[in-house]
Image (cartoon, rainbow, N blue to C red):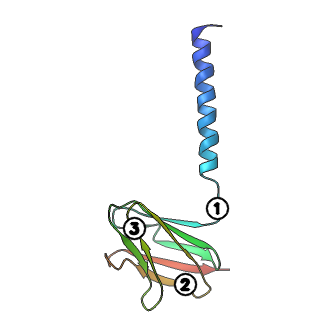
Amino acid sequence: MTAAFLNRRQLLATGSALLAGGTIARADDGAVHVTIEKLAFVPAKIEVKAGQTIEWTNKDPFAHTATVKGGWEVMIPPGKVATHVATADDSVDYYCRFHPNMKGRIKIVA
């Protein structure tokens, strides 16, 4: 075998291992994911089923909340993940209590 053949073989094996690992990391866990980055909820509007988990991942260096006026609030520390299990009454607008210009919408679907 030549050195070029071994390098190609090693490259293919490494690529296969990375792809397999990436597939496992992206497995669908049934949650609806929202990223918080640069003072924004992304996506800002989501559709979920009652009983489904909403997961916020805060990529900003400061805390945020998912706050429903007169309802519930989820604290999302910097660099952390926080969750809320949607209920039938959760077709709501929400915002960050610390940054009121950050807004999102949750719509419950059947």
Q: Which mark is residue 29?
A: 1
Q: Earlier in the sequence, mark 2 or mark 1?
A: 1
How far across and how far down the image is residue 69, in percent?
42, 88
Q: Which mark is residue 91?
A: 2
How far across and how far down the image is residue 97, in percent?
35, 80
Q: Earlier in the sequence, mark 3 or mark 2?
A: 3
Q: Which mark is residue 77?
A: 3
| Three-letter amino acid code of the residue under disc 1 | Asp
Secondary structure, mark 1, is: loop
Residues 23 and 44: in front is 23
**Quadrant of the snapshot with the N terminus:** top right
Mark 1 is surrounded, within 10 Å at the Cα level, by few (under 14), some (14 to 19) or many (20 or more) other residues, namely few
Secondary structure, mark 3, is: loop
Left or right of 29 on screen, residue 57: left
Q: Earlier in the sequence, mark 1 or mark 3?
A: 1
Of circles 2 and 1, which is in front?
A: 1
Of circles 1 and 3, which is in front?
A: 3
Q: Please name the residue shown 54% across and 84% down the image.
A: 91
Q: Please name the residue shown 61% across and 42% down the image.
A: 21
Q: Height in image: 95 above or below 31?
A: below
How far across and how far down the image is residue 65, in percent?
40, 75
Mark 2 is surrounded, within 10 Å at the Cα level, by few (under 14), some (14 to 19) or many (20 or more) other residues, namely some
| Three-letter amino acid code of the residue under disc 2 | Ser
